[in-house]
Image (cartoon, helix red, strand yellow):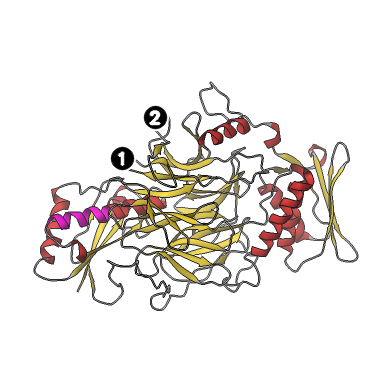
Amino acid sequence: MQSRILTQVLAVTLVAATLTLGSGCSIFQKKNKNAPGSGAGGSLPPTTGGIDLGSGDSTSGGRFALGSGTEQRGLFAPVYFDYDSAQIKNQLERAKVVAVADALKGNSKKLLIEGHCDERGTAEYNRALGERRAQNTRAELVRLGIDGNRISTISFGKDKPVDLGHGDTAWSRNRRCEFVLIN
Amino acid sequence: MKCRCFMMFVAVLGMTIGSATAQVVVRKPLQKKSVAVNGISGNQTLTEVLRNDVRLSGYLGLATGTSAEFVQEGNVRPDGMIECRVTHAFSKKVILAKAYPTSSDLRRLGHSISDDIVLAITGQRGIAQTKIAFVLKKGGASELCVMDYDGFNVRQITNDRRISAHPEWSPDGAKIAYTGYLNGYPDVVEINLQSRQRRLVAGFRGLNSGATYSPDGTRFALTLSKDGNPELYVLNVDGSGLRRLTNTKGAESSPSWTADGQQITYVSDDRGNPQLYSISRDGGEAVRLTIPPGAPSYNTEPAWSRPPASSDMASMLALTSRVAGKFVVGIFDHSRREVRPLTLDGQDSEDPSWSPNGRLLVFSKTQNWRSRLYLLDVITGEQLDLPAVDGNATEPAWGP
């Protein structure tokens, strides 16, 4: 029994050693080896341009290419949400969506809706909640007569707070949908 | 399956039935064995690695002098070989005597010796040679990193200055799937750690996130919102066989496969606050797991452990709950339908991920708005700190 376990563990150890992500693997930067505390330190140089994932498939249908320079931010007031809620909460917030709908009528501009959450809560749940906020806002625009094919959504979860503070004021500002007009 | 898990959970942890709290009685085989680690005389690095590995092992605890049940000793032979011996303190029986060729990577050598020590004393697989992936947030960007399980050898594996989130290992350890905003939108991307090639797994309209490999490595469970609000799907790793499992007005997220790969446990806020549900990998009726007031009102991040067949640990379900306004990592007790909180230290803890032997969790704790990674022995509840990195370390994923 003991030798069977030993054999199994040796096999596991061998596999683990073979797959070890350590030396000889070009993917990793070799800096800061054996240096906890400095970690993956140093500045992260920016990536130039988009990243070609070479997907070759057509799963990206219904999305607009981003970063083309025709995006206009800040034209519309953000829509704010209650904690843990994706519902457009009152007439004040709904009026902001109506203003966006009015701006989309009589032209063929496209719209990106970004859904965001405050920092409380777990990452993946917030990513789903941010998407629901964006989807509910999109649905409201569709009800107001805008073609849904003109609207894309992105959820950033809690990754892109607009207010870096911690507390009720910051949190209420961060639970939001932002609008980006694409000419 | 669920029944088997429940039985094993009760058998292994020996839950006290009838007490007011879900108190865990630790049976003797799961108690820590105390070891006096004398290290490898004449080699400071190896000695430090062995001591730290024993500290982090879960199964073993550091002891000194006569209180130790086991004594470890070692030395460097004249021919350069490293010798390690472990003796039972009372019977003087030698349970490990092995010589190792020296290595240019002393930490790696030390970890392999540590795993031999754990195996010799407990018969269990150690964790000292495993890796942990995590997300490092710094200056508005977040990048994927991989480190040794003890926090050493941190290596950055993306360099995109975009958002990268939710890394998950393939069962063979060769690939990591994660959520990357490489082209602005959240996509599921798989990175091959050897070739550094990246592949788009899911780039549908809307949200693509939370992908986790099935235990046999053939499928992903993931969240997509291509048909409206976020729902749970399964997808073969070759991109074929996309299948939707849920259909609700709420959002489904954070899938985790049961150890046998038959069920998927996930989060849904369909009825208000987020709660855990399980569904067959083939779809059908979902079963709700967490129901207040037995469970807290907010439960997310289910994570099933997958201990090997030879392990003394049962498969357990870790989760993150909100308890008294704080986020707490705990274990879901199927028999009582209760959550056993493990991190009631007044701080916010989240992102639990299991060690491959199913004894420890790695999680992220936020203190003064800074996030760091810790290990947690689920049997003793002991938290073991890892070296801090520059930036916020979140969403750890323990490799196979």
Q: Which residue is mark 2?
A: B293
Dot 1 amino acid type: Gly
> From the viewer's perspective, is A127 left or right of B353?
left
The residue drawn where x is 38% and y is 78% is: A49
Label 1 chain ID: B
Q: Nearer the viewer, residue B89 or A102?
A: A102
Does the stretch in magenta take in B338?
no
Residue A93 location in percent, x, y?
A: 17, 52
Q: Residues within 10 Å of mark 2 (few under 14, many from 20)?
A: few
Q: Is residue B8 visible?
A: yes
Main secondary structure type of the part rendered in magenta: helix
Instruction: State if disc 1 and disc 2 touch (CB < 8 Å).
Output: no
Dot 2 amino acid type: Pro
Image quarter of the C terminus of chain B: bottom right
Residue A91 location in percent, x, y?
A: 13, 49
Does the stretch in magenta take in A137?
yes
Q: Which residue is mark 1?
A: B272
Residue B384 location in percent, x, y?
A: 61, 47
> From the viewer's perspective, is A89 left or right of A48?
left
Secondary structure at numbered mark 1: loop
Range drawn in magenta: A133-144
> From the viewer's perspective, is B1 left or right of A178?
right
Residue B116 location in percent, x, y?
A: 76, 51
Q: Residue furthest left?
A: A106
Going from N to C along the chain, the mark reached first, 2 or 1, is 1
